[in-house]
Image: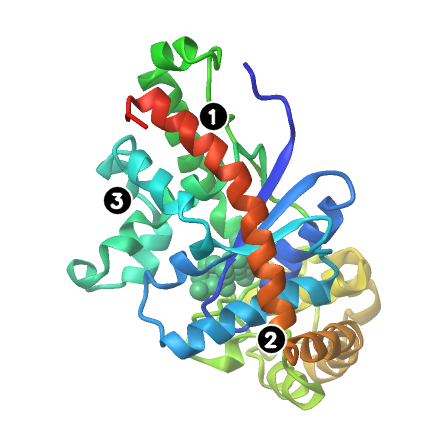
Amino acid sequence: MTIVKERIFSGVQSTGNLHLGNYLGAIVKFVELQKQYECLYCVVDLHAITVPQNPIALRANTREIAAAFIACGIDPKKNIVFNQSQVAEHAELAWVLNCVARIGWLNRMTQFKDKAGKDRENASVGLLDYPVLMAADILIYRATHVPVGDDQKQHLELARDIAQKFNNDFSESIARNGFGEAFFPLPEPLISGPATRVMSLRDGSKKMSKSDASDYSRINLSDDHDQIAQKIRKAKTDPDALPSEEKGLEGRPEADNLVGIFAALSGRAKSDVLGEFGGSNFSTFKNALVDLAVAKLSPITAEMRRIKQDESYIDTVLREGSERAQALARVNMNAVKDIVGFLR
Ligand code: ATP
Ligand code: MG
C-alpha cells in the first residue's frame, strides 16, 4: 500500500439551515478532529441539487453553511473549507466510479428510498446516484476517515465497496503505474460523539433533517431564544412523567430524544440527566432544556450572524479553500486517468 497519510473528509449539503443534529452528529467532531489531522470540510452543493433547489436560496445556503462551520470553531486557515461545485474533479471521478458501482448496490440505499418516497420513477437520477458522488468526494482526496452521523453509515459502506472494487478491477494497472496493491484507501466512518442520531421534534421515529417540511421538527443553529423556546415547548412528548432510569425510555422515542439532546448539550450521560429529572413532568424538563439549548447555541448563532454579514469574506474562504482542494484532487484525478487508461 502506498497510502499512509491520515486525512479527514466530510461534507454538509447546502439544503437549508444547519440544525442541532448536524451540529451534534457531525460538526462537533469536525472541530475536534482539526486538532490532530489534515481535514477537508466541504459544503456539498452538487448533492443539494439532487432535489429541486431555488438558485438564489442555494447560493445563500452555501454561504450559510460555510459561516456555520467557521462559527462552530472550524479554522479555515488550518483546514480546507470549500464548496464542492468549485472543484470539478468530484464530478469527474464520480463518472469513473459510476462505471465501477453496480445498480443493485444503489437500489438498496435507504436514504434513496426515504427521499424518493412513493414515486420512485419520478426521482432524479442524481438522487439515486448520490452515494457514488459521495464516494468520489471522499476518494478524490484518498481520505482515510469520514466523520458523519449515523444516517450516513450505509453510504460509507458503499464508498468502501466502490474503493475496493476499483482497486480489484484495476489491480494490474494500479501496480504498473507505481501505486502498489491498492490506489484508494478504504475510508473509515467515524460515527461517535455527543449524539449520532438526533430525531425530529415532531416524530421520534424520523431523524431531524434540514429538508423536513416542518421547521418545528428541528432546532436550527440560526434560531433565536424565542424560536428555540417555542419549538422545544411544542415538541411531541407522551403524557407520563420522566423515568428515573434509562430503561424507562424504551418505547418512548420522543422522551428518549429530548433526554438525549439534554445529555449531549450538557456533556452528561442520559442516566445522570434522568437522575436529576426522573419523576418530573415534561414542562419542567422542557424549561430546563430551553435554558440549556439557548446557553449553548446562542454564542454560535451570534457568531454566525456576524460572519454571514461579510459575504466577500465567506466567498474568499470558499474560493481559496477550493483552490487548495483542487491542487490535491488534480493529482489524484490524473493518477486515476492513468490507471483507467485515459490519454492525457
Ligand atoms: P437533508 O435533509 O437535506 O439530507 P441533513 O439534515 O440530513 O439534510 P446533511 O447535509 O445530509 O444534513 O448531513 C450533514 C451531516 O450531518 C452528515 O454527517 C449527517 O450524517 C449528519 N446528520 C444529519 N442529520 C443528523 C441527525 N439528525 N443526527 C445526527 N447527525 C445528523
Ligand atoms: Mg442528509
Which scheme is used to colour this image of the protein? rainbow
Report the amino acid beneath label 1. Phe
Q: Nearer the viewer's eye, disc 3 or disc 2?
A: 2
Instruction: Identify the residue at image location x=56%, y=35%.
Output: 143
The residue that mark 3 highlights is: 107
The x, y position of residue 32, in whole percent, is 75, 49
Q: Is residue 275 above or below residue 299?
A: above
Q: Residue 273: x percent and y percent? A: 79, 64
| Label 1 sits on residue | 184
- Residue at 62% over, 35% down: 7
Circle 3 crowding by C-alpha within 10 Å: few under 14, some 14–19, many from 20: few
**Does any portion of residue 206 appear in the rendered image?**
no
* Residue placed most toward the observer, 70 or 13: 70
Q: Quadrant of the N terminus?
A: top right
Give the residue furthest to the left. 121
First reached walking from the N terminus: tag 3 or tag 2: 3
Q: Residue at x 48, y 66 (%)?
A: 14
* Cα–Cα gap, marks 1 and 3: 24 Å
Nearest to the eye among marks 1 and 3: give it.
1
- Give the Cα separation between the discs numbered 3 and 2: 40 Å
Q: Would the CB of label 1 be found within 8 Å of ligand 1?
A: no
The secondary element bearing badge 3 is classed as helix
Q: Earlier in the sequence, mark 1 or mark 3?
A: 3
Question: What residue sits 37% from the left and 75% below the top?
Answer: 55
Residue 65 appears at what percent x and percent y? 57, 67
* SS state under label 1: loop
User: Split into 4 quadrants, where in the image is the C terminus?
Assistant: top left
Q: Which residue is mark 2?
A: 311
The relative height of residue 71 versus residue 126 in the rendered view (above or below) is below
- In the figure, 113 relative to 332: above or below? below
